[in-house]
Image (spheres, rainbow, N blue to C red):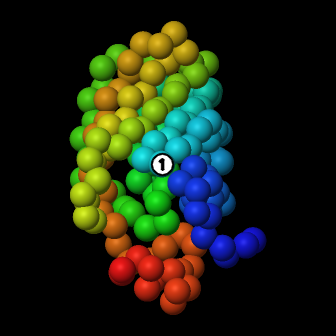
Amino acid sequence: MSTDIPSDPQALAEGCADRLWSGDKTSRMLGIRRDSIAPGSATVSMIVGENMVNGLDMAHGGLMFTLADVAFALACNTRNAIAVGNYCSVHFLRPASRGDRLIATARESLLEGRNGIYDVTVSDQAGRTVIEFRGHSKVVSGTHFPETSDQSAEAEA
């Protein structure tokens, strides 16, 4: 895997997502698909399977939250800085059912210094909103692509 940092923002977003996604075993276990990535945004999806329903035969809220969280994580990690969630809220607006395809779309609402705010909408295959999620991110130390001393000096200039 090349360690050159892509200079194009779209290529950088995709490269960061590739690196984050490669270690995400939970998403693979749940059958989550990465549908699109762009700077500050991400779309992922999953089908509600037989083993993803609760005792009321509805999609389990924790798994729908996980889908939203995956979109949030990808969106806030598109600029080579390691970002983690430090707060989120979720509103469950309607149930989803076994067999539904859920699509989570995350969009950056604010990025200032080390702080970011991302809004995630989870919709079903008919376009009905199921969840509204807002996540706050914090940039921590580290990068997805190693920076050379030349790149660090450029960033400081």
Q: Position of residue 2 (x, y in %)?
A: 73, 72
Q: Is residue 118 above or below residue 124?
A: below
Amino acid type for the residue under numbered disc 1: Pro
What residue appears at the point 67 percent right and 75 percent down from the top-left corner? 3
Structural crowding at the residue carrying mark 1, measured as other residues with C-alpha within 10 Å and reported as few (<14), some (14–19) or many (≥20): some
What residue appears at the point 52 percent right and 36 percent down from the top-left corner? 43
* Depth check, front residue: 119 or 153: 153
Label 1 SS: loop
Residue 27 visible within the image = yes
What residue appears at the point 47 percent right and 25 percent down from the top-left corner? 59
Q: Position of residue 125 (x, y in %)?
A: 55, 15
Q: Quadrant of the N terminus?
A: bottom right
Residue 26 visible within the image = no
Q: Quadrant of the C terminus?
A: bottom left
Q: Which residue is mark 1?
A: 39
Which quarter of the picture shows residue 139? bottom left
Which quarter of the picture shows residue 144? bottom right
What residue appears at the point 49 percent right and 18 percent down from the top-left corner? 124
